Amino acid sequence: MTSATRTCPSEALPLGALLDRGAAYLARHGVPPDEARAQAEILAEEATGLRRARLLLHLREAPAPEAVVALRGMLVRVARGEPVQYVVGRWPFCGAELGVSPAALIPRPETEGLVERVLAHPAWRAARRVADIGTGTGAIAVALALAAKAEGRAVEILAVDLSPEALALARRNAQGNGVGGLVSCLEGDGAAGLAPGSCDLVVSNPPYIPSAEVDALPPLIRDHEPRLALDGGPDGLDVIRQVILDCTQALRPGGRLFLEIGEDQGLSVRRLLERAGYGAVAVGKDLAGHDRYAEGTLP
Ligand SMILES: C[S@@+](CC[C@H](N)C(=O)[O-])C[C@H]1O[C@@H](n2cnc3c(N)ncnc32)[C@H](O)[C@@H]1O
């Protein structure tokens, strides 16, 4: 028994029953049934302060009344269409715990794949200065800084975004994950503000959805996540084009650019990289088998 749960008095529902009812309530309000239970558990973690493994040990106990009130309030917000990540205000990414808010995109598993590609590349081991363009929550910057710290290497990470609100979140996330000293947050447009030849690597998950498709996204995304993080212009490639060109200046010769891209953009981005003069161009797939990553090295 914990301070957040207590032996179940007859009138109070045990946590297990609250979770069953919560999941059914979410499913009735449009949350896919296979996600509803997991979302109810995530909310219960937040309401009780118990981490998932411990939560499941307390299913027969009644949560404290204030935890039940908090859980109900959060269930209502999710049922009304708010992303569960914004309701709990935090989300895991590559081993980091990130604060999330409507100021920035919710980090996605595909972007963990981008970080894995960077860390697996030989260029990472020699890198001393790395930029994350369009940092949002700071997800990529924080994950790379944590990796560098674990490797005992001094790598300077520049986290760049157009949005001051996103940068404030990224700064808090870097500090909250103990890498505030490695990550510098800079307001900027693409990589244009970076000194010529100053970066060994640039990593970017820019907005890449064509403008016309943004309006057709599910309301969960369209109505809650920032348009600036999604909208890549008429063909979705505006910011990708800009970052590819900016990085011909910002990268040092031999420096490498790693991009996340839309699943139908592999061929176009390969051509953009080749035309801009990058070599060793590669397009990679995500776990679903879709083109998702593009890379190139400046000669
Ligand atoms: C798809 S989100 C990626 C956020 C984060 N890197 C992630 O992977 O979760 C794109 C980010 O790029 C930023 N952004 C959009 N246009 C930009 C530009 N021209 N220059 C810099 N950042 C930009 C947005 O504010 C947003 O935070």
Image (spheres, grey):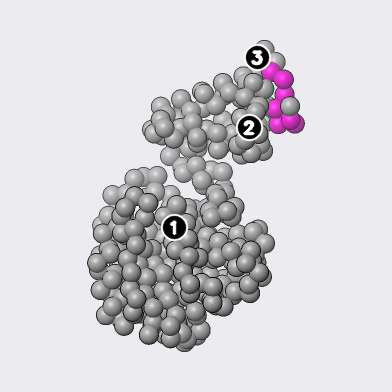
Report the disc number at residue 11.
3
Q: Which is more N-terminal, label 1 or label 3?
A: 3
In the rendered image, residue 5 lying in the magenta stretch gets the answer yes
Quarter occupied by residue 5: top right
Marker disc for residue 113 = 1
Label 1 amino acid? Gly
The foreground one among 277 and 160 is 277
Is residue 106 magenta-colored? no
Can the viewer see residue 81 in this picture? yes
Alpha-carbon neighbours of circle 3 within 10 Å: few (<14), some, or many (≥20)?
Answer: few
Mark 3 or 1: the one toward you: 1
Identify which residue is drawn at 67% across, 31% down: 66
Name the mark nearer the viewer: 3 or 2: 2
Where is residue 202? Give x, y as percent. 46, 74
Whether residue 242 can be seen here: no
Q: CA distance from mark 3 to mark 1?
A: 47 Å
Choose the circle earlier in sequence order: 3 or 2. 3
Magenta segment: 2-8
Q: Which residue is disc 2 drawn over? A: 55
Say which residue appears at 28% left-offset and 75% top-offset: 272
